[in-house]
Image (cartoon, rainbow, N blue to C red):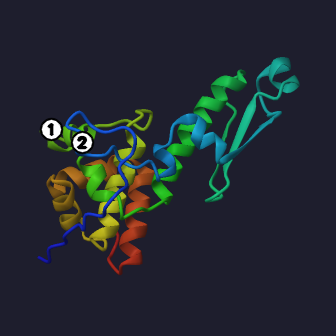
Amino acid sequence: MRRVKLEEKSFRVSAHQSKSGTDPEPPLALPYLLPDEALLADCDVQPYQASGPGGQKRNRTRSAVRIVHRATGVTVVAAESRSQLDNRKTALRRLRERLALTVRDRSTLALRIRLPEVRRLLQASGPIRIREGNPLYPLMAGLALDALDVAEGRVAEAAGLLGCNTARLVAFLKRHTSLWQAANAIRARHGHPPLR
């Protein structure tokens, strides 16, 4: 088995430092890790009038929301609720999930693995259980896919980078259909057969 070593990149120290004063907070270069306001500043938000069932209220209001991330072109839509505010929140959650599946960043992988929230999830016993609606889901999904990309599609090496075993990583990927498909796309790009 070939070992992959993560190179630690130097990051600028932000104004906010950890309690020890030595480690900078992780950079928020990944769009799905940005605060809501910053992410929405990078997007076009388009309310529109949805069609379909819902009666007079739905047919007369512009409650549906489409969000387009300008840098990547990723587009998401939410029209389930009669409230534009609820649809906006749903669309923003979907945008974070979609960006986590499409945007790869190898440079901050080592730093993201050391985040306390990530360590707790990876070091717990049993499967990595996190639902798609959980705010940590985009972070974990992006982290798993970035590790798989760094390991050139080799699942055992990716699990080693994350500090968990292969079975836990495969179970996490398999639990989420879109994550499973993204993982298989990475494996295909590196010349490996799809996971089954």
Q: Amino acid at mark 2?
A: Ile
Residue closest to the eye, 141 or 58:
141
Residue 85 located left or right of residue 10: right
- Residue displayed at 83% across by 33% down: 49
The x and y percentages for residue 65 are 72, 36
As rendered, which of 181 and 8 lies closer to the eye? 8
* Amino acid at circle 1: Ala
Front residue of 109/174: it is 109
Q: Is residue 196 above or below residue 120?
A: below
Question: Number of marks in the image?
Answer: 2
Query: Could you say whether the residue bearing mark 2 is in a helix, strand or loop?
Result: loop
Q: Secondary structure at mark 1?
A: loop
Residue 176 relative to residue 153: left or right: right
Q: Find residue 124 and name its label.
A: 1
| Residue 128 marker | 2
Residue at x 36% of width, y 78% of height: 190
Image location (x, y in percent) of residue 173? 32, 52
Image quadrant where residue 166 sits:
bottom left
Where is residue 121, by image quadrant? Answer: top left
Q: Position of residue 143 (x, y in %)?
A: 34, 53
Residues packed near mark 1 inside 10 Å, few (<14), some (14 to 19) or many (20 plus):
few
- Quarter of the image that includes the N terminus: bottom left
Mark 1–mark 2 Cα distance, whole angstroms, equals 8 Å
Can you say whether 129 is above or below 193 in the image? above
In the rendered image, the quadrant that contains the C terminus is bottom left
